Image (tube, helix red, strand yellow):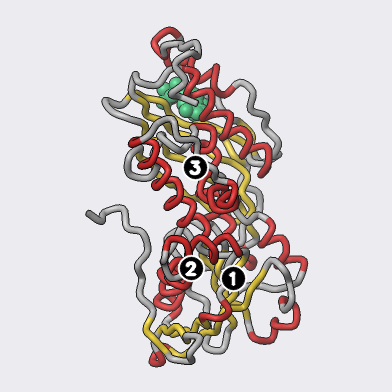
Amino acid sequence: MLEDKNQEKTSLSQLGEFGLIEHLTKHFEVTHSTTVKAVGDDAAVIDASEKQTVITTDLLVEGVHFDLSYMPLKHLGYKAVMVNLSDVYAMNAEAEQITVSLAVSNRFPLEALEELYAGIQLACATYKVDLIGGDTTSSTKGMLLSITAIGKAKKEELVYRDGAKATDLIVVSGDLGGAYLGLQVLEREKQVFQVNPTNQPDLDQYSYLIERQLKPEARKDIPKLLRDLEVQPTAMIDISDGLSSEIMHICKQSNTGCKIYEEKLPLDPQVIGTCEEFNIDSTMVALSGGEDYELLFTVSINDFDKIKGNPNLSVIGHITEAAAGMNLVTRANQEIALKAQGWNSFEE
Ligand code: ADP
Ligand code: MG
């Protein structure tokens, strides 16, 4: 990792900007026929073909969105790509290209950026996307990383947030709350480490949670699965801020209400066990945790037979008329209003 004092360090000024870009990008392969020109000219060129183009950007700031004391740079690179691909898949589209823009202070040696780009490259290879460009500049303090992802879909396959209708089923992929708990575990270990640097934590029992936080996977498989099942979602969103806030986005934009059933929320055993240990409510974690990068979508009730029993999917509730509000039905069969307590980067 970056903090390893014995490693050789190469100052970025030794390479210069063009040398640096060349060095960081030369091992990336272009795989899509739609990528006409990648890194190396004034701009990249994409052949738009007959499909519609999907574009999404995220900006990640050191100290706000990531903490390099427990986030290895390779993981940061991988995760930064996942965050963007997840948004493309949430449109029911296929991702094909990314751009990477980077501002770094002179605190970072070349080796640190190599690690970052190793993570980006692994993500590109695993998810079959082409790195086609970006920008590189210096910052006075810390690192800023902005990734843009570009994808495509047939017009009739694109799924927006505003298409949900009363009686539609609400479906989520995977399980919820793991990434948030992984962060809690890492924060706790960081504090222990600050008090006692020789302490070697045993994190085996949290392995799934830490992986969900440090190495999330975007659900590329879900749009494909839905196509194979011949299910066209009516609305879809990815879970970056927490289930509650995401379902509220769908309901507000679709002008509907919803009922989510507490007993249906998919939880990994490590989430349940760690919630008990930390004495926090697993339902709260599932509803408000965030960073799970699962897909939340609605489907017509007529599609229930096509999705029921699928191990990747959980039906967690249904859409209602707007007047019924947005509610959680508890295990005790009480209805309580959902609150969006998603993570907010402007919070104090
Ligand atoms: P310009 O001066 O026109 O902005 P640059 O020298 O910044 O050009 O970029 C040269 C090429 O390298 C372009 O294709 C650009 O998209 C690409 N590039 C620049 N920075 C990065 C980066 N951090 N990652 C990937 N590609 C990059
Ligand atoms: Mg530039």
Measured along the vertical axis of the image, is residue 339 above or below residue 180? below
| Residue 135 versus residue 272 in the image, above or below | above
Displayed quadrant of residue 340:
bottom left
Q: Identify residue for label 1.
A: 266
Q: Left or right of 132: which side holds 127?
A: right
Residue found at x 70% / y 81%: 303
Image position of 66 (left or right of 45)? left
Residue for badge 2? 286
Question: How far is disc 3 from disc 2 in space, using C-alphas?
Answer: 22 Å
Label 1 CA crowd tier, 10 Å (few <14, some 14–19, many 20+):
many
Kindly identify which numbered label has been placed on residue 80. Answer: 3
What's the residue at 61%, 62% (across, down)? 92
Q: Amino acid at mark 2?
A: Ala
Residue 4 percent location from the top left of the image = 47, 20
Who comes first in sequence, dot 3 or dot 2?
3
Query: CB atoms at circles 3 and 2 under 8 Å apart?
Result: no
Q: Position of residue 246 (x, y in %)?
A: 45, 68
Image coordinates for residue 131, horizontal then vertical, percent? 58, 34
* Front residue of 315 and 15: 315
Dot 2 or dot 1: first in sequence order is 1
What element does badge 1 sit on?
loop
